[in-house]
Image (cartoon, helix red, strand yellow):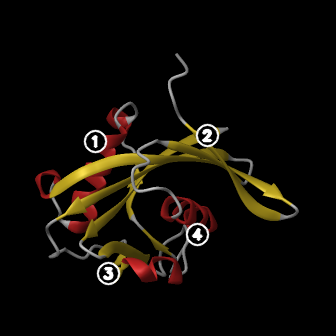
């Protein structure tokens, strides 16, 4: 079994969020909307923030210095086709930049936050964003979401990732 580590960021600017509509040529989830991100490189395995900042800059041109308050909010765990377990580290942050570069990953759009869930997202991202949007603004906890099927439908089990001492 393989383990795949990914970092995804949802960057906000005022009342808008930066979303990527994945290209139709993409092998994984073509045409699906997402945050920006991708796979960890070997030297980043213990440093999800570094992987996230690198992916943001590669996919958008937005540098680390243009991002404030980038925070890890979720770690999603999912088994994929009995071949791998995916760990997706989900970050949320703010940026003052709105000018972005386009890459071959797909098309980037600034979308009003109130239209976030109107886009065709992956099922795991939809459940995570519903949870995120339902949280208190003061809730700074990191949540772990474990994907499972309940009655043939995707379900996420949420737990706060906290120190127990």
Which of discs 2 and 3 lies nearer the camera? The answer is 3
Q: Secondary structure at mark 4?
A: loop
Q: Which mark is residue 2?
A: 2
Residue wearing tag 3: 109
Lateral position of residue 67 relative to residue 39, left or right: left
Residue at horizontal 61%, vertical 40%? Answer: 2
Quick one: label 4 or label 3, which is nearer the N terminus?
Answer: 3
The quarter holding residue 16 reads bottom left
Residue 71, given in percent of the width and then of the height, sits at 33, 47
Q: Which mark is residue 98?
A: none
Q: Residues within 10 Å of mark 3 (few under 14, many from 20)?
A: some
Q: Residue extending furthest left?
A: 65
The quarter holding residue 107 reads bottom left
The answer to whether residue 104 of the structure is visible from this angle is no
Quick one: label 2 or label 3, which is nearer the N terminus?
Answer: 2
Q: Residues within 10 Å of mark 1 (few under 14, many from 20)?
A: some
- Gap between marks 2 and 1 measured at Cα: 22 Å
- Gap between marks 4 and 1 measured at Cα: 24 Å
Quick one: label 2 or label 1, which is nearer the N terminus?
Answer: 2
Number of marks present in the image shown: 4
- Gap between marks 4 and 3 measured at Cα: 17 Å
Residue at horizontal 19%, vertical 53%? Answer: 68
- Gap between marks 4 and 2 measured at Cα: 21 Å
Vertical relation: 6 (above or below) 58: above
Q: Residues within 10 Å of mark 2 (few under 14, many from 20)?
A: few
Residue wearing tag 4: 122
Quick one: label 3 or label 1, which is nearer the N terminus?
Answer: 1
């Amino acid at each position: 079994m393989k383990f795949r580590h990914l970092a995804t960021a949802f960057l906000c600017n005022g009342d808008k969020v930066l979303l990527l509509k994945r290209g139709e040529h993409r092998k994984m989830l073509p045409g699906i909307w997402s945050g920006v991100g991708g796979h960890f490189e070997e030297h980043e395995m213990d440093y999800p923030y570094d992987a996230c900042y690198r992916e943001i800059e590669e996919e958008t041109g937005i540098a680390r210095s243009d991002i404030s308050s980038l925070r890890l909010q979720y770690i999603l765990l999912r088994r994929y086709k009995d071949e791998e377990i995916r760990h997706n580290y989900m970050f949320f942050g703010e940026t003052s930049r709105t000018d972005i570069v386009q890459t071959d990953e797909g098309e980037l759009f600034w979308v009003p936050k109130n239209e976030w869930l109107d886009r065709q997202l992956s099922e795991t991202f939809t459940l995570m964003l519903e949870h995120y949007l339902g949280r208190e603004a003061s809730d700074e906890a990191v949540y772990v979401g474990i994907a499972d099927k309940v009655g043939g439908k995707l379900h996420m089990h949420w737990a706060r990732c906290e120190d127990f001492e």
